[in-house]
Amino acid sequence: MRQYMKLGTLEKARVYERVIKLHQENILTHREIGMELDLPTKTINYLIRKFAVSTISTASLMKAKKITTDESADLKALKAELLKTQEALRMERLRADAYDRMIDIAEANFKIPIRKKAGVKQ
């Protein structure tokens, strides 16, 4: 890990701008920022406390993470609903086939035309 205190003024300014940017825009944790910039977590914490304007509260971050878990729950619910709908469609197709066969058998046994003929004159 490189030492933040040994950096020049311009380099320090670039580092703290990058830390603040990563913290606010990408919603990365302090440890992830430290790993990305090769800085200790203490330095990241210091820079964020010292220079970051708290536009994003911790509560809103927690809500954002909760929303993603809610979205995954919604996705699971939608997948379950899709499976249920597909099963219902399969059952309806089976029922339609059963009615078709029942009509075929009735027409053969009773020799009565049940289905409407196409192109019948009025």
Image (cartoon, rainbow, N blue to C red):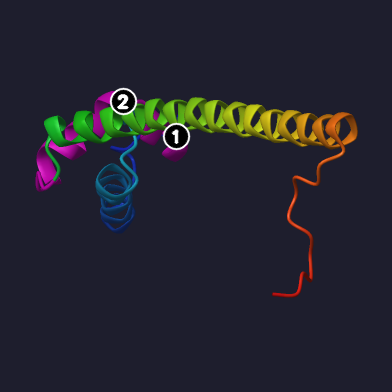
The quadrant in which the N terminus is found is top left
Q: Which residue is at a point 26% across and 55% down the rendered structure image?
A: 13
Please tell me in which quadrant of the rendered image residue 10 appears.
Answer: bottom left
Residue 46 part of the magenta-drawn span: yes
> How far across and how far down the image is residue 81, in percent?
48, 29
Amino acid carrying label 2: it is Thr
Q: What's drawn in magenta, residue-wise?
A: 31-55
Instruction: Confirm whether residue 71 shows in the render.
Output: yes
Circle 2: is it few (<14), some (14-19), or many (20+) Cα within 10 Å? some
> How far across and how far down the image is residue 51, in percent?
13, 46
Direction from residue 85 to residue 54 in the image, left or right: left
Direction from residue 54 to residue 19 in the image, left or right: right
- From this viewpoint, which residue is outermost toward the bottom? 122
> How far across and how far down the image is residue 96, in percent?
69, 35
Which secondary structure is most common in the magenta stretch? helix
Circle 1: is it few (<14), some (14-19), or many (20+) Cα within 10 Å? some
Q: 49 or 39, which is in the foreground?
A: 49
Label 1 sits on a secondary structure element that is: loop
Residue 69 part of the magenta-drawn span: no
Direction from residue 1 to residue 22 in the image, left or right: left
Could you tell me how far apart the alpha carbons at marks 2 and 1 are, in whole angstroms? Answer: 9 Å
Q: 41 or 67, which is in the foreground?
A: 67
Q: 59 or 48, which is in the foreground?
A: 59
Amino acid carrying label 1: it is Asp
Q: Which mark is residue 101?
A: none
> Where does label 2 land, which residue?
41
Label 2 sits on a secondary structure element that is: helix
> Where does label 1 land, which residue?
38
